Image (cartoon, rainbow, N blue to C red):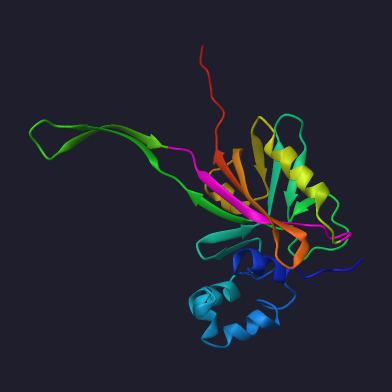
Amino acid sequence: MIDIDITDRMFAAFGYVPSGYPKQDVMRAGIAAAYASDAAISIGLGRANIALIKSKIGANVFVNGCSFADLTLRNSENGKCYEFANGLLSEVTTGILAPPPMLKFERTKNIVKTAIDGSDSEVIESFGCKAWQITIEGILVDMENHQYPQRKMQELREMFEVNNAFEVLDCDIMADLGIENLYIEKVSDLQVLLDYQDTIKYKLTAYSMKPVEFFI
């Protein structure tokens, strides 16, 4: 079995790479050279971010306000799992859809405001938390034949077309945020990476959800 370092692909897709992907401590030689000079600033990394990359090793790695994390989504209807894991892939990737994705989270509140006539004040009548908006970005790689990753693209399409929620498994950061289920609203930014015909970049937009309880 041959291990294949996908660091270059991650850097081409996002401009930075979390520790734990490559065999080296942080990045491969070309990026490591930038770390040693002011060139790191010009490529968007910056000393602070690189220091952060060096200090974080494990399942959750925070870079540029994002988290690279292992993630498993299980179709709540038929039980099929989609696994995003194992940053250093091998030729045998059975059961793994993609390497750990980059995760971003955003949340706002539902607030009802009523203006008071003749006053600069307003009354807050009700408020509550909206669902988490979750951005999932990553790459699909054909590690077997190094051709266009057709099977993985089909699996990504299949996952998007699921018309019910996914259970979130094996993702510490989502557990910390209380996200147990999500649904995928949008797939975008699908593109083949320049110089890597075996790699496609993708972006998913999802929202957290909780089961609705009915009382009789």
The verdict on residue 133 being magenta is yes
| Horizontal arrangement in the rendering, residue 175 relative to residue 156 (left or right) | left
Kindly give the residue lying farthest to the top in the view shown: 216
The verdict on residue 12 being magenta is no
Rendered position, 140 above or below 121: below
Rendered position, 34 above or below 60: below
Count the numbered circles shown: 0
Kindly give the residue lying farthest to the bottom in the view shown: 37
Occupied quadrant, residue 102: bottom right
Kindly give the residue lying farthest to the right in the view shown: 1
Rendered position, 40 above or below 199: below
Quarter of the image that includes the N terminus? bottom right
Residue toward you, 31 or 108: 31
Kindly give the residue lying farthest to the left in the view shown: 118
| Horizontal arrangement in the rendering, residue 201 relative to residue 93 (left or right) | left
| Horizontal arrangement in the rendering, residue 187 relative to residue 117 (left or right) | right
Q: Position of residue 168 (x, y in %)?
A: 65, 43
Q: Which residues are magenta?
A: 130-145
Taking the spot 54% from the left edge, 40% from the top edge, the residue there is 207
Residue toward you, 77 or 9: 9
Taking the spot 55% from the left edge, 32% from the top edge, the residue there is 210
Taking the spot 53% from the left edge, 43% from the top edge, the residue there is 178
Residue toward you, 173 or 22: 22
Taking the spot 68% from the left edge, 55% from the top edge, the residue there is 191
Occupied quadrant, residue 208: top right
Q: Position of residue 87 (x, y in %)?
A: 73, 63
Residue toward you, 202 or 95: 202
